[in-house]
Amino acid sequence: MDMTEKRKLFESIVPQYSEKLYWAIRRIVLCHDDANDVLQNVFIKVWNGIDDFKNRSKLSTWLYRIAVNEALDFLRRKRNVASLDISDNISVADSLEADQYFDGDRVQALLQEAIASLPDVQRVVFNLRYYDEMKYSEISQLLDTSEGALKASYHIAVKKITAFMKEHQ
């Protein structure tokens, strides 16, 4: 692919997928600024890897895979620096409510705290299924795992979230 074709393809991808990828990332990393940073890294990886995209999967699946992996890598790096659990007696819900870009209410903030308390894989599966309404077959391709394992992860995540919400009402 020559540089002009690459640029045209990239320029069509960015506006079409920016918002979807931003929200997929934001639900994993929670913070607006972090989500923007991760999204920038995603588009750098897309630009660098666009020549290698072979249409073995849908473009959206390839983009989501990059976004999810970048978001999870970000969390791993962040955990190496400091705990993801905001340990200064500030809950995820309180932190979100203080975020000028968060426009939800207390229940939505608590839901995000419940989701943030899940292990990474359960959190990703829950977000992709619940918010992005992806089919298990798509998530299976994205995460390279079986549909059965995904269904189990989602079911366990829903149970944990339900228990968390009941405990915090």
Image (cartoon, grey):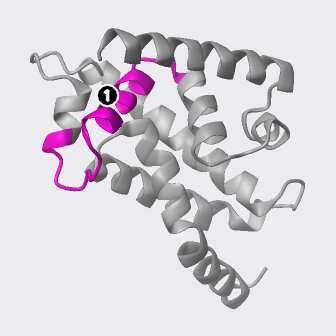
Q: Which residue is mark 1?
A: 110
- Spot occupied by residue 49 in the image (x, y as percentages of width and height): 67, 60
**Is residue 59 shown left or right of residue 128?**
right
Q: Residue at x 76, y 22 (%)?
A: 151
- Spot occupied by residue 11 in the image (x, y as percentages of width and height): 58, 82
Relative to 89, say whether 51 is above or below: below
Q: Residue at x 67, y 17 (%)?
A: 155
- Spot occupied by residue 80 in the image (x, y as percentages of width and height): 32, 20
Q: Residue furthest bottom?
A: 4
Q: For the residue labelled by badge 1, is the local secondary structure a helix, a strand or a loop?
A: helix
Q: Quadrant of residue 141?
A: top right
**Is residue 115 shown left or right of residue 20?**
left
Q: Closer to the camera, 159 or 42?
A: 159
Relative to 46, say whether 116 is above or below: above
Magenta extent: 97-120
- Spot occupied by residue 122 in the image (x, y as percentages of width and height): 59, 21
**Is residue 38 shown left or right of residue 87?**
right
Q: Residue at x 72, y 33 (%)?
A: 143
**Is residue 168 shown left or right of residue 148?**
left
Binning the other alpha carbons within 10 Å of mark 1 as few (below 14), some (14 to 19) or many (20 upward) gives many
